[in-house]
Image (cartoon, rainbow, N blue to C red):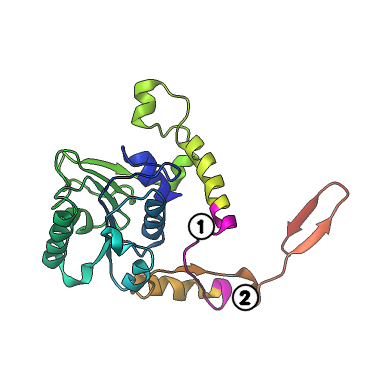
Amino acid sequence: MTAAIGLYQRFEGLPLPWHPTTKPIPLIIYGAASAVGAYAIKLAQLSNIHPLICVAGKGIPFVETLIDKSKGDVVLDYRDGDEKLIQGFETAVDKAGGKVEYAFDAVSEAPSFTNICKVLDHETGQITLVLPRSDYSAIPSSIRKSQTMVGAVHASGDEQQFQKETGSKTGNIDFGYVFFRFFSRGLQEGWFRGHPQEVVPGGLSGIEAGLKNLKNGKASAVKYVFRMRDTEDLERPKINQRKDSWSVFLD
């Protein structure tokens, strides 16, 4: 849902999946192997948004399974350093027609957005970021920036600019209503898939190991799952059946 909000609510001009574009629309996706980045790729594919200029690291092999190189999609390795990454951006943008107006930064920590802004159009460029309360002052004021958070589909106070300008009664909450059902349909029919998952041993006891893996950069292109039932010495809930209700409690 975070990816959907960023692409279709925060950006102006990108086509929805049920009305895909027939013309090239270059899009930068930084952090393409992350869950948000990967879902942004999957949705962009449904909208026929290409070429995709993706940035990843260890997750590059995974990202390559999502993109369509025949339509100009590429993956750049941020581990090669900022200078080489920017050169890769410039080459990809040149091949895309010399102009890129959309960038989804699923990392949102410098130098991700500063590197993006080296090639993002400074007159019509739009960038959306996912970390709140961060310092984005390095982004040129001429580039339209926004913050994308999944909570927007639950918060009535998060109005889009078009709502303020038109007085529209529909917005992010209605967008979420539609897209949650859209995702469910895609999962049922098989044309939309979830992110790779890895079950961490030990249930709740494995959280520390999972966090250390994240901190040390060992987790890439994967979502960690912690199953409570795998936790040793965890007291099992007792089910208390009453006449009109069920209650679950722990001793």
Pick the front one: 244 or 95: 95
* Figure quadrant of the C terminus: bottom right
- Residue located 34% across and 51% down the image: 130
Task: Point out residue 134 in the picture as x, y percentages from the top left corner.
Answer: 27, 50
Depicted 170 relative to depicted 31: above or below? above
Q: Quadrant of residue 123?
A: top left
- The residue segment tinted magenta is 186-204
Pick the front one: 212 or 198: 198
Q: In this figure, which residue is indicated by the disc labeled 1?
A: 191
Q: Is 203 contained in the magenta span?
A: yes
Q: In this figure, which residue is indicated by the disc labeled 2?
A: 230
Find numbered disc 1 in the image and state the secondary structure of the residue it sits on: loop
Task: Point out residue 162 in the picture as x, y percentages from the top left corner.
Answer: 36, 28
Q: Amino acid at mark 1?
A: Trp
- Residue located 38% across and 64% down the image: 66
Depicted 59 relative to depicted 144: above or below? below
Dot 2 or dot 1: first in sequence order is 1
Relative placement, left or right, of 190 versus 222 is right
Question: Which residue in the rendered view is the most extreme toward the right?
Answer: 243
Q: Quadrant of residue 70?
A: bottom left
Find numbered disc 2 in the image and state the secondary structure of the residue it sits on: helix
Q: Is 110 contained in the magenta span?
A: no
Relative placement, left or right, of 14 versus 236 is left
- Residue located 42% across and 70% down the image: 211
Determine contact: label 2, label 1, CB under 8 Å: no
